[in-house]
């Protein structure tokens, strides 16, 4: 598999404190890579290391298959990024602000109109940034990151401050970028729900160490639980056990079928109906990324013994 | 050339900033003070000593006192634009080597020495024009060595531009560069009278180069400025041209 970012045994300390401890990670090309961790875990420092804003004490950082420090300006020309809160010149207009990136990346003026349209800020391009709402500022920072169709987007908390509609718009945009434009996306966030909706791969960093790196599908899995409400509870339970499902009943007089794939549910429904069992409701739930994250983050699992490392 | 793009961008960033206002207000305060002294005196000082004295007063106040303070202010504001919203992060993630940004900011700050001095020249000329309309007449002709002085000051101000820029780039504090500027300017006024020690305070170089008649001292001031500028430029670019942006 081709990797767009590779970190090998990278360490970084500030003021005698080890912030990044010997981390290694690989971001596959054309993926949306979710980088998760609590506040202070080392997410932003890792992002800054990848962008060359801070320098590693030891280890190797390769971006686009090249050692980062050797060709930093060329590498940065192909990257769009947002680091932490948006860095904006609030006394400038949106158009003037984007002119900075457009000029330094040697792009055509029309590129500004294009990215403003993508983030829906065309009407406010002549407005001074200080008058923007937090969501508008975030969208402007994303517009800046999209200048010149970068091959890699590195976004640190990209949906911070956005309203639900704004979050949804950004989510759709990020999810479609790899397929539509061949852009790989590295998203650092603590909003697990958001990452779960867009990421194809995830890594978890805890106290400066990567404790897990995996494809998202392997982490959250395909199996879940099905809660059924039926009129003939005992009959249904007997039938499902006989058919090989793992069932239990809960205090609400419902059947709980565990370890079932979503694709198996229609067959199960048909089976019950064919035996004249009245099906009142059926709810399928999958373990969320949040649940997996909490389990892994709190259990102190090591990358070497999770069994789900890709 | 990326450097020209960077210069254009640095000027773009200064739109609606206080630097442009200061570039007008600092020379204006010097000219207004001179003008008021003459008006207070009903133009007698012009009649007695001529326009040459008026020019000399303006030049002394500007190069000796206001310009060094203005330089501290400009270098501080040039870098405060980046410190304010942590836009160092944005600039450091652009495809330009950081030392180019460092040098460009220093260069633009230095250019403001030229712009402000031209504003000073224009405002002084304007005030003389207004005073002639008011009927004040000097014995001498309307002339000034201001531009010759400006050429010298462009060199002698370079070390203090670089020191101010260095401090303002490295530290977010607005107090440090301004306090240093005030302290060094004040001590320069005293040290400039010392034949032995003036060279140890770069803030005296403007004054020595423009107001002292001794040709050797003028050459010395220009030489020290050039040598110190080269040392500061190389040292600070090596030191600060690759700083970590961890904010």
Image (tube, rainbow, N blue to C red):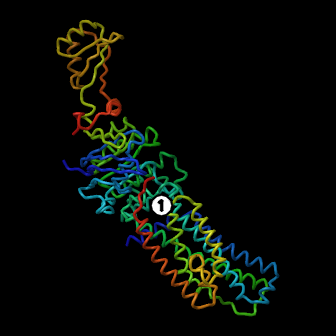
Judge whether residue B114 can be spotted in this image: no
Q: Pick the residue in front: A141 or B65.
A: B65
Where's the N terminus of chain B, which quadrant?
bottom left
Query: Helix or strand or loop: what does disc 1 sit on?
Result: helix
Residue at 28% x, 31% y is A220
Residue sitting at the far front: B196
Location of residue A19 in the rendering, given as x and y in whole percent from the top left corner? 38, 47
Residue at 48% x, 68% y is B105
Judge whether residue B8 can be spotted in this image: yes
Residue B59 figure quarter: bottom right
- Is residue B81 found left or right of A11 in the rendered image? right
Residue B213 figure quarter: bottom right
Location of residue A119 in the rendering, given as x and y in whole percent from the top left corner? 41, 49
Q: Residues within 10 Å of mark 1 (few under 14, many from 20)?
A: many
Give the labeled residue for mark 1: A96
Q: Pick the residue in front: A163 or A114.
A: A163
């Amino acid at each position: 598999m081709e990797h767009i970012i590779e970190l090998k045994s990278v360490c970084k300390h500030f003021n005698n404190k080890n912030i990044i401890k010997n981390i290694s990670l690989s971001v596959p090309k054309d993926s949306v890579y979710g980088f998760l961790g609590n506040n202070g875990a080392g997410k932003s420092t890792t992002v800054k290391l990848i962008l060359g804003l801070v320098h590693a004490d030891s280890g190797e950082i390769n971006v686009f298959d090249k050692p980062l420090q050797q060709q930093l300006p060329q590498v940065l020309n192909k990257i769009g990024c947002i680091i932490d809160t948006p860095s904006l010149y609030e006394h400038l207009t949106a158009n003037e602000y984007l002119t900075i990136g457009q000029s330094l990346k040697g792009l055509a003026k029309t590129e500004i109109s294009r990215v403003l349209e993508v983030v829906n800020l065309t009407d406010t391009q002549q407005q001074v940034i200080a008058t923007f709402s937090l969501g508008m500022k975030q969208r402007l920072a994303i517009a800046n990151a999209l200048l010149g169709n970068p091959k890699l987007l590195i976004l640190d908390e990209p949906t911070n401050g956005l309203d639900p509609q704004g979050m949804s718009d950004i989510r759709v945009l990020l999810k479609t970028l790899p397929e539509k434009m061949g852009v790989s996306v590295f998203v650092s966030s603590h909003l697990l729900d958001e990452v779960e909706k867009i990421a194809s791969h995830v890594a978890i960093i805890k106290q400066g160490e990567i404790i897990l790196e995996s494809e998202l599908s392997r982490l959250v899995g395909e199996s879940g639980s099905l809660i059924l409400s039926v009129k003939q509870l005992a009959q249904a339970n007997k039938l499902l056990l006989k058919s090989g499902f793992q069932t239990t009943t809960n205090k609400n007089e419902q059947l709980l079928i565990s370890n079932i794939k979503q694709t198996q549910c229609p067959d199960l429904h048909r089976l019950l109906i064919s035996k004249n069992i009245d099906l009142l409701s059926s709810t399928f739930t999958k373990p969320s990324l949040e649940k997996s994250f909490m389990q892994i983050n709190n259990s102190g699992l090591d990358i070497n013994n999770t069994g789900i490392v890709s | 050339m990326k450097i020209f793009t960077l210069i254009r961008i640095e000027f773009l960033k200064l739109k609606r900033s206080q630097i442009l206002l200061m570039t007008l207000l600092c020379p204006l305060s010097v000219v207004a003070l001179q003008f008021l002294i003459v008006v207070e005196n009903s133009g007698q000082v012009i009649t007695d000593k001529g326009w040459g004295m008026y020019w000399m007063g303006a030049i002394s106040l500007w190069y000796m006192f206001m310009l060094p303070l203005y330089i501290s202010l400009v270098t501080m504001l040039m870098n405060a634009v980046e410190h304010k919203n942590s836009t160092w992060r944005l600039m450091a993630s652009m495809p330009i080597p950081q030392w180019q940004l460092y040098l460009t900011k220093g260069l633009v700050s230095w250019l403001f020495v030229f712009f402000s001095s031209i504003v000073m020249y224009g405002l002084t000329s304007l005030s003389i024009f207004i005073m002639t309309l008011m009927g004040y007449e000097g014995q001498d002709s309307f002339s000034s060595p201001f531009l010759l002085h400006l050429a010298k000051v462009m060199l002698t101000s370079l070390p203090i531009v670089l020191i101010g820029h260095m401090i303002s780039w490295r530290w977010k504090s607005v107090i440090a560069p301004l306090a240093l500027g005030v302290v060094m300017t004040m001590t320069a006024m005293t040290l400039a009278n010392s034949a032995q020690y003036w060279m140890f305070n770069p803030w005296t170089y403007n004054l020595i180069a423009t107001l002292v008649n001794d040709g050797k001292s003028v050459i010395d001031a220009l030489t020290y400025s050039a040598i110190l500028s080269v040392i500061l430029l190389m040292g600070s670019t090596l030191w600060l041209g690759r700083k970590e942006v961890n904010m």
